[in-house]
Image: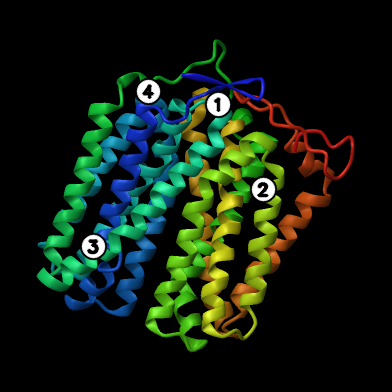
Amino acid sequence: MPLQKDGELHQSLYTLPVIVLLTAVAWSFVGLGFVMPLRALYARDIGASSVQVGLMATSFLLASFVVTPAIGWLSDRMGPRIVLGVSLLTYAWLLVAYVPVTSPGALIALRALEGVSAAGVLTPARVLMNTVSPPDRYGEALGLVSTARTVGILAGPAVGTLLASGFGYTPSFLAAGGVLTLSALGVFIVLRPHTDATPRAATPTPVFSSGFTGPLALAYGLAVVLAWPQGVTPAIWRLYMQDRGASLLLIGLSFTTFALAASALAPLAGRISDRYGRWRPILAGLALSGAVYCVYGLRLPPGWIVALALVEGAGLAVARVATDGFLADHVPQDLRGRIHARFSAAGTAGSLVGAAVSGVLYAVEPGVPLLAMGMLYLLVALALLVVPAIRHLFRAVSIGRSKAKPFVGLSSTAGKL
């Protein structure tokens, strides 16, 4: 139902399709969270070496990266609802398949297949959210998707670990498969087939020219930068905290404080970027998180690191959600799946590079990988601030989005940023 506010017409965001989609995303990541802390332990218990455990993670990321463009193409051809539902069902079967596996090689293959299924969850979910949410609230809607994902990841590991400690690994894998199956049923039953409809332009637009415009290329580049920490964290964060003298409890708390700040701020950050433009939140988020990474490079007490993780989570949440909204503003409707897939693939590439580089730099000094990441973030923020060509991209005409309030911070002629 449209709402009148401040002289403008606003459509309601919290419709049944949006709520069902957010619930499906949250439950799917609760299910994935059940087994997130268990895979490596399970692999070690059946005789996998540390190299094989590492290959499990690598096979997942590489498979996801390779298949993501195909997922985008399928979302445009078959509809994101079908791709999301089938991917959730497939993921459920793969998790149940862990139960009879006794070979480390089979686990590596399973993780690669998981990477294929995982690529079919978040990308079509984001496309669907762009379909069922009002155009002038894309940022807030995508922020809610991020929150649903984070809440699921936070809730799942605790339940999965509790099940495994009391009853062994099997109940956790079976419960995860059951939760993902319920998520798939919710997508198929409640979301109507019309959400799969993709508007087609009267004259087909060349894929290359429409998929690699200036704003979209900027969004892809920001995705690479903002995903860098997702590679650094699994590669060196636990080691970094341990080298700083942190206990297991403090290491766990650092993840919790980061996730709580990110999940709490994401919807608000999206709402602000919808109303006032994408430039300022992206700039502020990059500068804030970049400063935190530089401070991490110092020899801080563990308690300070846990507290700073709150600031890091807040900065990244603001920058990521505003970047999501910036992408959504400029996606041609008939290429939503493919462009969201390229955006996801760019993020996966950033994670892979972050993991590879941080491992090498950590051998120099534990704080160096984080200091390097902080400098990168601050340089990107500086480029957003002072390079006119980049700032101009934020003033480009967006697709299907009402105008935000004009930016008047740096000069009277800056326009909407």
Q: Circles 1 and 2: CB distance less than 8 Å?
A: no
Q: Circles 1 and 4: CB distance less than 8 Å?
A: no
Residue 37 visible here: yes
Q: Circles 1 and 3: CB distance less than 8 Å?
A: no
Q: Amino acid at mark 4?
A: Thr
Disc 4: which residue:
195
Q: Is residue 356 left or right of residue 57?
A: right
The quadrant in which residue 122 appears is: top left
What residue is rendered at 81% in x and 33% in y?
Answer: 415
- Report the Cα–Cα distance between label 1 and label 3: 37 Å
Disc 3: which residue:
159
Reply above or below: 20 against 303. above
Q: Is residue 347 left or right of residue 31?
A: right
- Sort mark 1 into few (<14), some (14-19) or many (20+) by Cα contacts within 10 Å: many
Q: Secondary structure at mark 1?
A: helix
Q: Secondary structure at mark 2?
A: helix
226, 136: nearer the viewer: 136
395, 285: nearer the viewer: 285
What residue is rendered at 51% in x and 74% in y?
Answer: 306
Q: Amino acid at mark 3?
A: Val
Disc 2: which residue:
281
- Sort mark 4 into few (<14), some (14-19) or many (20+) by Cα contacts within 10 Å: some
Disc 1: which residue:
135
Q: Amino acid at mark 1?
A: Pro
Residue 357 visible here: no
Q: Earlier in the sequence, mark 1 or mark 2?
A: 1
Q: Residue 54: x and y, percent?
A: 36, 71
Mark 1 or 4: in front is 1
The quadrant in which residue 224 appears is: bottom right
177, 10: nearer the viewer: 10
